[in-house]
Amino acid sequence: LLLLVHAEVSTARLLHPLITALVSGLVEDNQHASAAERMRLRVVVHAGEILADAHGHTGDDLNHAFRLLNAEVTRAVLASSPVATLVLVVSEVVYQGVVRHAHAGIDPDGWQPVHIHEKETVARAWVHLPGLADQPDLPAVLVAPEVGLASPPIPRELPRPTADRKSTRLNS
């Protein structure tokens, strides 16, 4: 299921109460289902720009959401916790803009960073297993390293030529 939500809808509302209600309904439904019929879901929330085209929708942000959903890490987190009915993955953008600010019903302490490597996407994302009182520790191989500066700062001006550096001239 692909759910595209208008930009006027708060991303925080997607995490709570929408996901919270989804988990509650899924838990209740699974109680009345046989083991073979129980559902376990992977859910991703990302925010960004998309475009409508002749085939539906497209855009880098939509691709990013699909990469988070299909990543082996996402599958592994759900597989590593058989009691969980759902793994919720949010992009770094959603974590930094919503989760870490502890919007109503969202506890940032229940989220763990993971390293996503899917096709051309290498990114940090955050996972949560809603409905569990305690979040399980993830295997070390899944946990994202601390994020530091991506590269040295860009100098404000170019370095001055040194005396031993020869000047190069382009001739046309």
Image (tube, grey):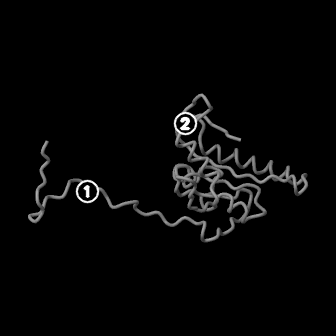
Query: What residue type is disc 2 on?
Result: Ile
Query: What residue type is disc 1 on?
Result: Pro
Q: Earlier in the sequence, mark 1 or mark 2?
A: 2
Q: How many marks?
A: 2
- Which label is found at residue 30? none
- Which residue appears farthest toward the bottom when viewing the image? 140
Q: Position of residue 69 (x, y in %)?
A: 64, 51
Residue 11 image-quadrant placement: top right
For the residue carrying disc 1, how many other residues have a C-alpha within 10 Å: few (<14), some (14-19), or many (20+)?
few
Seen from the viewer's position, the closer of residues 149 and 120 is 120
32 on left or right of 104: right
Seen from the viewer's position, the closer of residues 71 and 33 is 71
Seen from the viewer's position, the closer of residues 136 and 109 is 136
Seen from the viewer's position, the closer of residues 114 and 15 is 114
Residue at 58% x, 46% y: name it. Answer: 46
For the residue carrying disc 2, how many other residues have a C-alpha within 10 Å: few (<14), some (14-19), or many (20+)?
some
Residue at 61% x, 47% y: name it. Answer: 66
Q: Position of residue 151 (x, y in %)?
A: 37, 60
Circle 1 sits on which residue? 155
Q: Secondary structure at mark 1?
A: loop
Circle 2 sits on which residue? 50
Report the quarter where the N terminus lies.
top right
Q: What is the C-alpha distance between the residues marked 1 and 2? A: 34 Å
21 on left or right of 146: right
Q: Secondary structure at mark 2?
A: loop
Report the quarter where the C terminus lies.
top left
- Which residue appears farthest toward the front when viewing the image? 172
Residue 168 image-quadrant placement: bottom left
